[in-house]
Image (tube, rainbow, N blue to C red):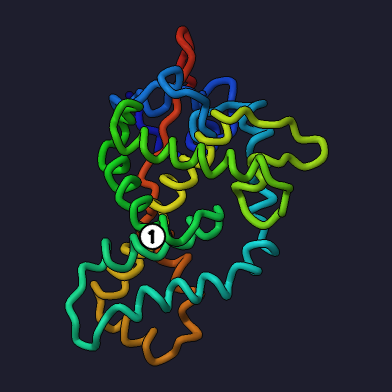
Amino acid sequence: MYVLARHEDVRDALTDHQAYLSVDNFALEGGTRTADLPAVPITMADPPYHTALRARLRRWFAPARLRKQEPRVREIVAGVLDTWQPGQKAELYHELARQIPTRVVYAFLGLPEQDWERLHQWADAIDDSLPELRTDMPEFLAITRYLGQQLAARAASPATGEDVLDGLVHPADGEPPLTPVEAVIHAFQLTIAGTDTTASLITNLLHELLVDRTRWERLLADRTLVPAAIPWAANSASAAARMARRVPAGSRWRS
Protein backbone atom coordinates (compact mmCIF):
# COMPACT_ATOMS: atom_id res chain seq x y z
CA MET A 1 0.00 0.00 0.00
CA TYR A 2 1.24 3.50 -0.87
CA VAL A 3 0.22 6.81 0.71
CA LEU A 4 -0.25 9.88 -1.49
CA ALA A 5 0.14 13.23 0.25
CA ARG A 6 1.17 15.78 -2.40
CA HIS A 7 -1.73 17.85 -3.67
CA GLU A 8 -1.20 16.95 -7.33
CA ASP A 9 -0.94 13.22 -6.54
CA VAL A 10 -4.12 13.23 -4.46
CA ARG A 11 -5.94 15.20 -7.17
CA ASP A 12 -4.85 12.65 -9.80
CA ALA A 13 -5.99 9.74 -7.63
CA LEU A 14 -9.43 11.29 -7.21
CA THR A 15 -9.93 12.33 -10.83
CA ASP A 16 -8.09 9.77 -13.00
CA HIS A 17 -10.58 6.90 -12.99
CA GLN A 18 -8.54 4.81 -15.41
CA ALA A 19 -5.39 4.74 -13.27
CA TYR A 20 -7.03 4.71 -9.82
CA LEU A 21 -10.06 2.49 -9.24
CA SER A 22 -12.70 2.53 -6.53
CA VAL A 23 -13.65 -1.11 -7.09
CA ASP A 24 -12.27 -3.25 -4.24
CA ASN A 25 -10.99 -0.15 -2.45
CA PHE A 26 -12.06 -1.53 0.94
CA ALA A 27 -10.18 -4.76 0.23
CA LEU A 28 -6.95 -2.75 0.53
CA GLU A 29 -7.50 -2.60 4.30
CA GLY A 30 -8.50 -6.23 4.69
CA GLY A 31 -12.12 -5.38 4.08
CA THR A 32 -14.86 -6.59 1.79
CA ARG A 33 -14.33 -7.08 -1.93
CA THR A 34 -16.88 -5.51 -4.27
CA ALA A 35 -17.75 -8.90 -5.77
CA ASP A 36 -18.75 -10.17 -2.30
CA LEU A 37 -21.66 -7.72 -2.15
CA PRO A 38 -25.04 -8.34 -3.80
CA ALA A 39 -24.75 -5.03 -5.72
CA VAL A 40 -22.09 -2.35 -6.23
CA PRO A 41 -22.38 0.54 -3.73
CA ILE A 42 -21.46 4.03 -4.90
CA THR A 43 -18.25 4.16 -2.84
CA MET A 44 -16.93 1.08 -4.67
CA ALA A 45 -18.13 2.10 -8.14
CA ASP A 46 -16.24 3.60 -11.07
CA PRO A 47 -17.54 5.55 -14.08
CA PRO A 48 -19.78 5.27 -15.99
CA TYR A 49 -21.92 3.47 -13.37
CA HIS A 50 -20.76 5.81 -10.60
CA THR A 51 -21.46 8.90 -12.73
CA ALA A 52 -25.04 7.84 -13.47
CA LEU A 53 -25.76 6.86 -9.88
CA ARG A 54 -24.27 10.08 -8.51
CA ALA A 55 -26.45 12.12 -10.87
CA ARG A 56 -29.47 10.16 -9.73
CA LEU A 57 -28.81 10.79 -6.05
CA ARG A 58 -27.70 14.39 -6.51
CA ARG A 59 -31.24 15.67 -7.00
CA TRP A 60 -32.09 14.50 -3.49
CA PHE A 61 -29.12 16.36 -2.04
CA ALA A 62 -29.50 19.59 -3.99
CA PRO A 63 -29.20 22.72 -1.79
CA ALA A 64 -32.78 23.83 -2.45
CA ARG A 65 -34.16 20.45 -1.39
CA LEU A 66 -31.94 20.35 1.69
CA ARG A 67 -33.10 23.81 2.76
CA LYS A 68 -36.67 22.53 2.79
CA GLN A 69 -35.59 19.98 5.40
CA GLU A 70 -34.37 22.64 7.84
CA PRO A 71 -37.53 22.73 10.03
CA ARG A 72 -37.42 18.94 10.40
CA VAL A 73 -33.70 19.01 11.21
CA ARG A 74 -34.26 21.69 13.87
CA GLU A 75 -37.04 19.56 15.35
CA ILE A 76 -34.75 16.50 15.51
CA VAL A 77 -31.89 18.45 17.13
CA ALA A 78 -34.25 19.95 19.70
CA GLY A 79 -35.63 16.49 20.45
CA VAL A 80 -32.16 15.13 21.19
CA LEU A 81 -31.20 18.10 23.38
CA ASP A 82 -34.50 18.01 25.27
CA THR A 83 -33.51 14.66 26.79
CA TRP A 84 -30.63 16.35 28.64
CA GLN A 85 -30.90 18.06 32.01
CA PRO A 86 -28.84 21.13 33.09
CA GLY A 87 -25.58 19.99 34.65
CA GLN A 88 -25.98 16.45 33.34
CA LYS A 89 -22.82 14.67 32.22
CA ALA A 90 -23.04 13.18 28.74
CA GLU A 91 -20.99 11.00 26.42
CA LEU A 92 -20.93 13.39 23.49
CA TYR A 93 -20.24 10.96 20.67
CA HIS A 94 -23.00 8.43 21.36
CA GLU A 95 -25.53 10.76 22.98
CA LEU A 96 -25.19 13.77 20.67
CA ALA A 97 -22.89 13.43 17.68
CA ARG A 98 -24.17 9.99 16.69
CA GLN A 99 -27.83 10.61 17.50
CA ILE A 100 -28.41 13.73 15.41
CA PRO A 101 -27.06 12.64 11.98
CA THR A 102 -28.63 9.18 12.18
CA ARG A 103 -32.07 10.62 12.88
CA VAL A 104 -31.68 13.28 10.20
CA VAL A 105 -30.62 10.72 7.58
CA TYR A 106 -33.42 8.33 8.52
CA ALA A 107 -35.94 11.15 8.18
CA PHE A 108 -34.40 12.25 4.89
CA LEU A 109 -34.59 8.71 3.53
CA GLY A 110 -38.21 8.47 4.61
CA LEU A 111 -37.87 5.69 7.21
CA PRO A 112 -40.64 5.50 9.85
CA GLU A 113 -39.64 7.17 13.11
CA GLN A 114 -40.81 4.24 15.23
CA ASP A 115 -38.07 2.12 13.62
CA TRP A 116 -35.16 4.54 14.13
CA GLU A 117 -33.86 3.02 17.36
CA ARG A 118 -33.48 -0.51 16.03
CA LEU A 119 -32.01 0.85 12.78
CA HIS A 120 -29.48 2.73 14.90
CA GLN A 121 -28.54 -0.44 16.77
CA TRP A 122 -28.08 -2.42 13.55
CA ALA A 123 -26.07 0.40 11.97
CA ASP A 124 -23.74 0.70 14.99
CA ALA A 125 -23.00 -3.03 14.92
CA ILE A 126 -22.23 -2.92 11.19
CA ASP A 127 -20.13 0.21 11.54
CA ASP A 128 -18.03 -1.50 14.23
CA SER A 129 -17.24 -4.34 11.80
CA LEU A 130 -15.89 -2.13 8.99
CA PRO A 131 -13.88 -2.23 6.76
CA GLU A 132 -14.89 -5.90 6.68
CA LEU A 133 -18.61 -6.07 5.92
CA ARG A 134 -19.81 -9.62 6.50
CA THR A 135 -22.98 -10.16 4.53
CA ASP A 136 -23.90 -13.06 6.81
CA MET A 137 -23.85 -11.03 10.04
CA PRO A 138 -27.30 -10.85 11.67
CA GLU A 139 -27.43 -7.05 11.65
CA PHE A 140 -26.66 -6.83 7.92
CA LEU A 141 -29.34 -9.40 7.13
CA ALA A 142 -31.83 -7.60 9.39
CA ILE A 143 -31.25 -4.11 8.00
CA THR A 144 -31.23 -5.17 4.34
CA ARG A 145 -34.38 -7.24 4.86
CA TYR A 146 -36.04 -4.25 6.52
CA LEU A 147 -34.98 -1.85 3.75
CA GLY A 148 -36.18 -4.31 1.13
CA GLN A 149 -39.62 -4.34 2.74
CA GLN A 150 -39.75 -0.55 2.90
CA LEU A 151 -38.69 -0.20 -0.74
CA ALA A 152 -41.14 -2.85 -1.92
CA ALA A 153 -43.98 -1.00 -0.20
CA ARG A 154 -42.91 2.24 -1.90
CA ALA A 155 -42.64 0.55 -5.30
CA ALA A 156 -46.20 -0.76 -4.94
CA SER A 157 -47.51 2.77 -4.31
CA PRO A 158 -47.63 5.82 -6.61
CA ALA A 159 -44.57 8.08 -6.65
CA THR A 160 -44.65 10.96 -4.17
CA GLY A 161 -41.25 12.58 -4.82
CA GLU A 162 -40.97 13.29 -1.10
CA ASP A 163 -37.87 11.35 -0.04
CA VAL A 164 -34.91 9.26 -1.15
CA LEU A 165 -36.60 5.87 -0.84
CA ASP A 166 -39.29 7.05 -3.21
CA GLY A 167 -36.64 8.20 -5.68
CA LEU A 168 -34.84 4.85 -5.58
CA VAL A 169 -37.90 2.91 -6.72
CA HIS A 170 -39.54 5.55 -8.94
CA PRO A 171 -36.96 6.77 -11.48
CA ALA A 172 -37.26 10.20 -13.04
CA ASP A 173 -37.67 10.59 -16.78
CA GLY A 174 -34.60 9.24 -18.55
CA GLU A 175 -33.33 7.29 -15.53
CA PRO A 176 -33.04 3.50 -15.85
CA PRO A 177 -34.85 1.61 -13.09
CA LEU A 178 -32.77 0.06 -10.34
CA THR A 179 -33.15 -3.61 -9.51
CA PRO A 180 -34.59 -4.30 -6.04
CA VAL A 181 -31.15 -5.45 -4.85
CA GLU A 182 -29.47 -2.28 -6.16
CA ALA A 183 -32.06 -0.10 -4.42
CA VAL A 184 -31.51 -1.93 -1.13
CA ILE A 185 -27.71 -1.60 -1.30
CA HIS A 186 -27.87 2.13 -2.08
CA ALA A 187 -30.37 2.73 0.74
CA PHE A 188 -28.17 0.64 3.04
CA GLN A 189 -25.07 2.65 2.23
CA LEU A 190 -26.83 5.95 2.86
CA THR A 191 -28.07 4.55 6.17
CA ILE A 192 -24.55 3.56 7.27
CA ALA A 193 -22.03 5.86 5.56
CA GLY A 194 -24.31 8.88 5.55
CA THR A 195 -24.16 9.14 9.33
CA ASP A 196 -20.66 8.15 10.43
CA THR A 197 -18.65 10.99 8.88
CA THR A 198 -21.12 13.60 10.12
CA ALA A 199 -20.94 12.18 13.64
CA SER A 200 -17.14 12.43 13.45
CA LEU A 201 -17.39 16.03 12.20
CA ILE A 202 -19.59 17.03 15.14
CA THR A 203 -17.21 15.35 17.59
CA ASN A 204 -14.17 16.98 15.99
CA LEU A 205 -15.88 20.38 16.10
CA LEU A 206 -16.59 20.06 19.82
CA HIS A 207 -13.04 18.88 20.47
CA GLU A 208 -11.48 21.77 18.54
CA LEU A 209 -13.66 24.26 20.40
CA LEU A 210 -13.00 22.81 23.85
CA VAL A 211 -9.29 22.06 23.51
CA ASP A 212 -8.89 25.83 23.74
CA ARG A 213 -11.71 26.99 26.01
CA THR A 214 -11.55 30.56 24.69
CA ARG A 215 -12.87 29.32 21.33
CA TRP A 216 -15.95 27.85 23.02
CA GLU A 217 -16.53 31.00 25.02
CA ARG A 218 -16.27 33.18 21.89
CA LEU A 219 -18.92 31.05 20.22
CA LEU A 220 -21.23 31.30 23.22
CA ALA A 221 -20.82 35.07 23.26
CA ASP A 222 -21.42 35.49 19.52
CA ARG A 223 -23.65 32.84 17.88
CA THR A 224 -23.10 34.43 14.45
CA LEU A 225 -19.70 32.67 14.45
CA VAL A 226 -21.33 29.21 14.35
CA PRO A 227 -21.62 28.90 10.52
CA ALA A 228 -17.92 29.68 10.09
CA ALA A 229 -16.92 27.24 12.85
CA ILE A 230 -18.22 24.21 10.95
CA PRO A 231 -15.94 24.40 7.85
CA TRP A 232 -13.11 25.51 10.15
CA ALA A 233 -13.46 22.29 12.14
CA ALA A 234 -13.75 20.22 8.96
CA ASN A 235 -10.44 21.64 7.73
CA SER A 236 -8.75 21.34 11.12
CA ALA A 237 -9.64 17.68 11.72
CA SER A 238 -11.15 15.91 8.73
CA ALA A 239 -13.83 13.31 9.41
CA ALA A 240 -12.46 11.30 6.47
CA ALA A 241 -8.84 10.50 7.32
CA ARG A 242 -8.15 8.73 4.03
CA MET A 243 -9.65 7.65 0.72
CA ALA A 244 -8.50 4.33 -0.69
CA ARG A 245 -8.01 3.59 -4.39
CA ARG A 246 -6.66 0.56 -6.25
CA VAL A 247 -4.39 0.57 -9.29
CA PRO A 248 -4.93 -2.06 -12.01
CA ALA A 249 -2.50 -4.96 -12.15
CA GLY A 250 0.59 -4.12 -14.19
CA SER A 251 0.34 -0.37 -13.62
CA ARG A 252 3.51 1.60 -13.04
CA TRP A 253 3.89 4.47 -10.60
CA ARG A 254 4.47 7.89 -12.15
CA SER A 255 6.91 9.88 -9.99
**Which quadrant is home to the N terminus?**
top left
- Relative side of 61 to 127, left or right: right
Residue 164, position as x, y percentages in the image: 61, 50
Q: Is residue 105 visible?
A: no
Give 144 or 215, whichever is nearer the viewer: 144
Give 165 or 74, whichever is nearer the viewer: 165
Q: Is residue 160 visible?
A: yes
User: Which amino acid, mark 1?
Assistant: Leu
Of all residues, the one furthest to the top in this rendering is: 250
Q: Is residue 169 above or below residue 108?
A: above
Residue drawn at point x = 43 percent, y = 45 percent? 193
- Relative side of 89 to 191, left or right: left
Residue 76, position as x, y percentages in the image: 45, 71
Residue drawn at point x = 48 percent, y = 14 percent? 248
Give 178 or 237, whichever is nearer the viewer: 178
Residue 106, position as x, y percentages in the image: 48, 56
Q: Which residue is mark 1?
A: 201
Give 154 or 9, whichever is nearer the viewer: 154
Residue drawn at point x = 52 percent, y = 26 percent? 40
Q: Residues within 10 Å of mark 1 (few under 14, many from 20)?
A: many
